Amino acid sequence: MAGARPATTERTFGYYRLEILAAVVNAVLLFGVAVYVLLEAWRASLNVRGAYLEVLGDGAGERAATSRATRNGSGRSNTDSTAPAAR
């Protein structure tokens, strides 16, 4: 380890500052990775919410179409509701 080198006349604290700077760089990188992970998790949750809303809308549309068909009572599709019933 570079921080374990003894002090010299030029470096009165030895290489201890190098060890501190390495710890600071390590901490900054760790915080950067943590922020990246949190941002990706947030984006993924937005994608899940969008998919949930799409399925919810599809279900509402299906319920409306089923309700219209059962109110019609003929069993025909609701696009043919104005056509006369076949005998």
Image (spheres, rainbow, N blue to C red):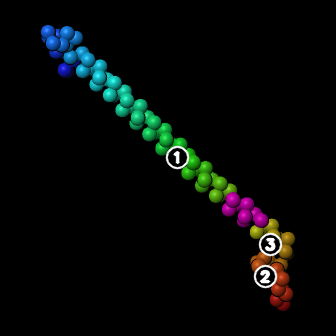
- Image height check: is 33 above or below 3? below
Q: Is residue 31 magenta?
A: no
Circle number at residue 87: none
Decide: marks 2, 3 in contact (CB < 8 A)?
A: no
User: Element type at marker 2?
Assistant: helix
Q: Residue at x 52, y 47 (%)?
A: 44
Q: Nearer the viewer, mark 2 or mark 3?
A: 2
Amino acid type of the residue that numbered disc 2 sits on in the rendered structure: Asp
Q: Which badge, 2 or 3, is on the more N-terminal residue?
A: 3
Q: Residue at x 80, y 72 (%)?
A: 69
Instruction: Measure the alpha-carbon separation of dots 2 and 3.
Output: 10 Å
The residue at which mark 1 appears reads as: 43
**Residue 74 placement (x, y as % from top left):** 83, 78
Image check: 77 left or right of 28? Answer: right
Residues packed near mark 3 inside 10 Å, few (<14), some (14 to 19) or many (20 plus)? some
Decide: marks 1, 2 in contact (CB < 8 A)?
A: no
Instruction: Measure the alpha-carbon separation of dots 1 and 2.
Output: 44 Å
Amino acid type of the residue that numbered disc 1 sits on in the rendered structure: Arg
Magenta stretch? 57-64
Instruction: Measure the alpha-carbon separation of dots 1 and 3.
Output: 39 Å
Image check: 69 left or right of 44? Answer: right
